[in-house]
Image (cartoon, rainbow, N blue to C red):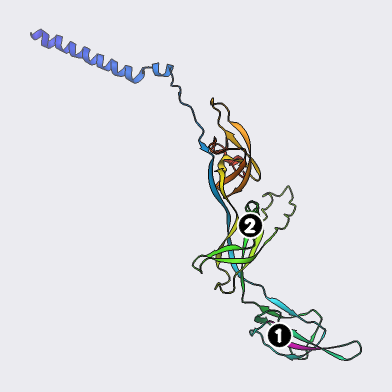
């Protein structure tokens, strides 16, 4: 028994520890490579998101940022050359349209005197008026400036926004933050942007974007001040109970475009040309090329993967 305790048991324990150590070394330095020899292969398929052609209503409103401004002063001009004989008003005074501002005496070819009354062309405040009795004036000289009490709203209209207007609007809905209730401004005009100047190809930066100017008159009974920020909403038309699809599904923009119909066998999608109507920026009307219930790709192929190439759907 003494021999067993002294020699046998220690030898057994040494063998056990040696086996444990060998197992740890194998796990640490000689891992099983069977997993590497058979790499996993994806078995699923990537499906492009689709959408269905629906019937809906599109309000083609264009909203732009604008500013309230005072209408420009109007000059009062001399109708004849001659001498100022009477001054009937003073700077800073309110005058009505047609009010007398001054009397001018001129001379006919036969030497006789002729008279002209300088009148206010509009109602407003006489902002510039420095005439003196005895002063000589010439035909067409601007002798006074009358600033009206009326205001206007102006805003810039980008080319892509102007393209959405199917007709020339004559008025706009104006909203002023913290101001009066929304109101309608009339007499709306759109002034075309000046043609961009030719740029030296060697000059970096490319050409500048040209914009048109929208201007409309604020009603006289609406209380506003120059410098107030405003939002103009231009009504570009409405289409009710028409076929609509997301603008992201269309390649192209004005008038015609291309949509992609998914293939039944999972192959390449079919290109289909469509005729387009008005758009609200997120949805666009389809007038021909599709029917209600047709399934199309929700995004133009490649638009999500590479958005910098400009293929971002409608208008891209």
Q: Is residue 100 found inside the magenta-colored segment of the image?
A: yes
Q: Position of residue 132 (x, y in %)?
A: 74, 89
Question: In this view, which residue lies farthest toward the left?
Answer: 1
Q: Position of residue 108 (x, y in %)?
A: 88, 87
The answer to the question of whether label 1 and label 2 lie on touching residues, with beta carbons closer than 8 A, is: no
Depth order, front residue of 121/142? 121
Q: Is residue 168 found inside the magenta-colored segment of the image?
A: no
Q: What is the secondary structure assignment of the residue under circle 2?
A: strand
**Residue 255 picture quarter:** top right
Q: Which residues are magenta?
A: 97-105
The residue wearing badge 1 is 130
Depth order, front residue of 290/118? 290
Give the foreground label among 1 and 2. Answer: 2
**Residue 173 picture quarter:** bottom right
- The residues tagged by marks 1 and 2 sit, at their Cα atoms, a distance apart of 40 Å
Graded by Cα atoms within 10 Å as few (under 14), some (14 to 19) or many (20 or more), the crowding at tag 1 reads few
Graded by Cα atoms within 10 Å as few (under 14), some (14 to 19) or many (20 or more), the crowding at tag 2 reads many
Q: Can residue 207 be seen in the rendering of this structure?
A: yes
Residue pictured at 57% horizontal, 69% vertical: 227
| Image side of residue 102 versus residue 124, left or right | right
> Which numbered disc, 1 or 2, marks the residue that appears first in the sequence?
1
Q: Position of residue 141 (x, y in %)?
A: 78, 79
Depth order, front residue of 174/198? 174
Q: What is the secondary structure assignment of the residue under circle 1?
A: loop
User: Image height check: is 68 above or below 197?
Assistant: below
Q: Main secondary structure of the magenta part?
A: strand
Q: Position of residue 183 (x, y in %)?
A: 55, 66
Q: Can residue 33 be seen in the rendering of this structure?
A: no
Q: Which mark is residue 157?
A: 2
Question: In this view, which residue lies farthest toward the front?
Answer: 241
| Numbered disc total | 2
């Amino acid at each position: 028994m003494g021999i067993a305790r002294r020699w046998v048991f220690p030898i057994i324990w040494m063998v056990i520890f040696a086996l444990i150590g060998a197992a740890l070394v194998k796990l640490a330095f000689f891992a099983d490579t069977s997993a590497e020899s058979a790499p996993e292969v994806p078995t699923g398929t990537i499906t492009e998101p689709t959408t269905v052609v629906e019937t809906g209503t599109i309000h083609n409103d264009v909203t732009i940022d604008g500013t309230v401004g005072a209408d420009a002063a109007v000059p009062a001009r001399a109708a004849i050359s001659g001498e100022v004989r009477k001054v009937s008003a003073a700077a800073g005074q309110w005058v009505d349209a047609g009010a007398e501002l001054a009397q001018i005496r001129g001379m006919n070819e036969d030497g006789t005197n002729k008279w002209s009354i300088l009148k206010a062309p509009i109602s407003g405040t006489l902002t510039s008026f420095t005439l003196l009795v005895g002063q000589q004036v010439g035909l067409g000289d601007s002798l006074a400036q009358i600033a009206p009490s009326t205001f206007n709203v102006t805003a810039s209209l980008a080319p892509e926004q102007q393209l959405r207007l199917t007709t020339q609007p004559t008025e706009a809905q104006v909203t002023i933050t913290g101001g009066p209730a929304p109101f309608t401004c009339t007499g709306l005009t759109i002034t075309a942007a000046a043609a961009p100047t030719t740029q030296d190809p060697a000059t970096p930066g490319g050409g500048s974007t040209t914009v048109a100017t929208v201007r409309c008159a604020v009603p006289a009974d609406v209380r506003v001040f120059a410098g107030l920020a405003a939002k103009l909403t231009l009504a570009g038309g409405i289409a009710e109970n028409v076929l609509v699809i997301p603008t992201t599904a269309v390649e192209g923009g004005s008038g015609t475009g291309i949509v992609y119909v998914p293939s039944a066998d999972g192959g390449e999608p079919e290109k289909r040309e469509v005729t387009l109507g008005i758009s609200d920026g997120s949805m666009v009307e389809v007038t021909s090329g599709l029917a209600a219930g047709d399934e199309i790709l929700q995004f133009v192929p490649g638009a999500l993967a590479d958005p910098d190439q400009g293929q971002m759907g409608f208008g891209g």
